[in-house]
């Protein structure tokens, strides 16, 4: 028994180490509960205010997101319009680039044709005149040869010149 008392004295059990609390009256309990309820009402009201603010923020954020989406859609529409406009202008430029050299080459060929026609029309009277002069020269040579058969001095002169 001595050992058991010594053990309890040296190593006291936890139940004996608890200090007894003073007794609270019912009135104090009711007051504390009332204060707790009022605190809970305040906390609930704050939570409701916080939820309301979160809802307002969500609405504002949704509105801003919708506005941003509208702006993005407008920007995409403008980009599409610009792409179409650029495509049309590129097509016009391509047509111009295709027609430009074609018209230039056609003008050059027309100019070359005009030059050739002009040369022929300018040279034609000269060629006719030259042919007429050749015919006349041939006739004169034929006449001189015939006369040279009758005049030996003329025949000798024509031989020296290489005409007979």
Image (cartoon, rainbow, N blue to C red):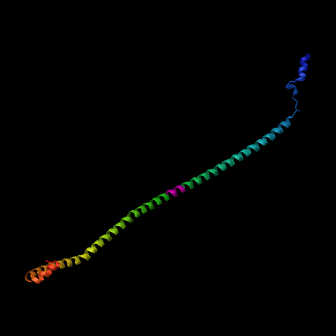
Farthest left residue in view:
150
Residue 87 image-quadrant placement: bottom left
Specify the segment rendered in magenta. Answer: 75-80
Q: Position of residue 161 (x, y in %)?
A: 17, 79
Of residues 62 and 143, the one nearer the viewer is 143
Of residues 117 and 130, the one nearer the viewer is 130
Total marks drawn? 0
Residue 59 is one of the magenta-drawn residues: no
> In the shown orientation, is residue 50 left or right of residue 15?
left
Relative vertical location of residue 60 with respect to residue 146 in this rendering, above or below: above
> What secondary structure prevails in the magenta region?
helix
Q: Position of residue 40 (x, y in %)?
A: 76, 41
Rendered residue at 27%/74% (across/down): 119
> In the shown orientation, is residue 49 left or right of residue 129?
right
Rendered residue at 92%/17% (across/down): 2
Rendered residue at 66%/48% (across/down): 55
Farthest top residue in view:
1
Relative vertical location of residue 121 with respect to residue 84 in this rendering, above or below: below
Q: Position of residue 67 (x, y in %)?
A: 59, 54
> In the shown orientation, is residue 101 left or right of residue 117?
right
Q: Position of residue 27 (x, y in %)?
A: 85, 37
What is the quadrant of the N terminus in the image?
top right
Residue 76 is one of the magenta-drawn residues: yes
């Amino acid at each position: 028994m001595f050992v058991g008392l010594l053990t309890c004295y040296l190593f006291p059990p936890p139940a004996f180490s608890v200090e007894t609390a003073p007794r609270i009256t019912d009135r104090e309990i009711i007051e504390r509960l009332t204060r707790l309820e009022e605190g809970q009402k305040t906390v609930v009201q704050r939570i409701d205010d916080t939820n309301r603010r979160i809802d307002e923020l969500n609405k504002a954020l949704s509105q801003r997101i919708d506005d941003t989406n509208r702006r993005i859609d407008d920007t995409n529409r403008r980009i599409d319009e610009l792409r179409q406009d650029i495509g049309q202008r590129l097509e016009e430029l391509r047509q111009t680039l295709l027609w430009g050299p074609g018209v230039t080459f056609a003008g050059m060929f027309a100019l070359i044709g005009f030059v050739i026609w002009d040369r022929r029309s300018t040279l034609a009277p000269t060629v006719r005149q030259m042919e007429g002069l050749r015919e006349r020269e041939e006739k004169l040579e034929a006449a001189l040869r015939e006369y040279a058969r009758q005049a030996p001095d003329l025949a000798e002169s024509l031989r020296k010149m290489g005409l007979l």
